[in-house]
Amino acid sequence: MTRVMAVRGVAAAVCVAAAVILVLLALDARAWSSRFPADDLRYRRDASAPKLWRPHELSPFGLDRAVLGVDDDIAYRRALREFRIGRPLEPVFSTDVTTHRVQAQIKLTEVMATAGPPARASQAANLLGVLGFAMATQDAAQRTTFLNNAITAFKEAIALDPTNDDALFNLEYALDQLKGSGEQQAGGSDKQGQRGRAGLKPTGHGY
C-alpha cells in the first residue's frame, strides 16, 4: 500500500511539474510572438540596439526555444546584426568594427551549416561574399585572393537559391572586377567608381 501511494505521489508530482512547464512554455511562446516583431523594428532603426531578441525566458534550459524552433531564426538575425554593425564596405578600421566583421563571418558560416531553408543559407552565402569583396577593396596585396573567395561564396549562394538576384548581381560584378582589376588599378576605368555597388545592390540588399 505504501509503495502504491509513493508511486501515486511521484506521478502526481510529475503531472504538476509537466503542467507548470506547459504554462511556462505558453508564456514564453507569447513573449516570443511579440518580441520578434518588436525587436525586428528596433533592429531596423538601430542595429546596435542592446538586448535584441532576448526576452526574459521562463522555461528552463532554453526549452522554449527548442520547442518553438526559434534558435535558427535568432542565429540568422544575430548574424545579420553583426554584418550591419561591421559596415563591411565602409573604409572604417577599428578593433570594434573588425571584431563585428569577424563575428559576422563566423555567424553567417554557422547559418549556412544548419539545416535551414535554402533561401536563408543562400542569403548568408551572399553576405559572406560581400565580406570577401569588402576585404578585396581594402587590401590591394590580397585583392585577387579575396575576390576569388567572394566569387566562390556568390556561386554557392546561387546554387542554394537560383532566384537570389542579389547574389547573381554580386557575382557578375565581382567577376568583372577580377577580370579588369589591373586596368582599374591603373585608374583608367569608369567601373572603378562603381566599386561600392557589390553586395549593396547596394551592399547586402535583401537581408
Image (spheres, rainbow, N blue to C red):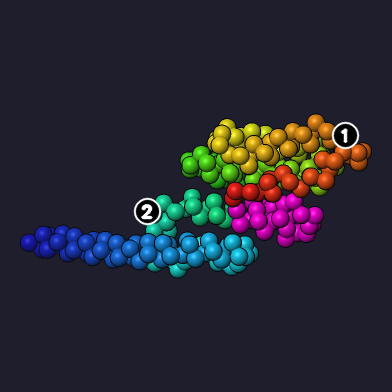
Q: Give the foreground label among 2 and 1.
A: 1
Decide which of tag 2 and tag 1 comes sooner along the chain. 2
Q: In the rendered image, is residue 94 in sight?
A: yes
Which residue position holds label 2?
67
Percent coordinates x, y for residue 104 in the rendering: 64, 51
Q: Which mark is residue 182?
A: 1
Please count the marks in the image: 2
Q: What type is the residue that disc 1 sits on? A: Gly
Residue at image position (58%, 62%) is 43
Classify residue 58 by image quadrant: bottom left
Magenta-colored stretch includes residue 104? yes
Tell me where the magenta segment starts and ends, as one range. Answer: 80-105
Amino acid type of disc 2?
Val
Of residues 125 and 141, the one drawn nearer to the viewer in this rendering: 125
Q: Quadrant of the N terminus?
A: bottom left
Q: Residue at x 72, y 44 (%)?
A: 198
Magenta stretch contains residue 179: no
Q: CA separation, marks 2 and 1?
A: 54 Å
| Left or right relative to 179: residue 7 | left
Asked if residue 65 is positioned above or below residue 172 in the image, the reply reads below
Left or right, 67 with reference to 49: left
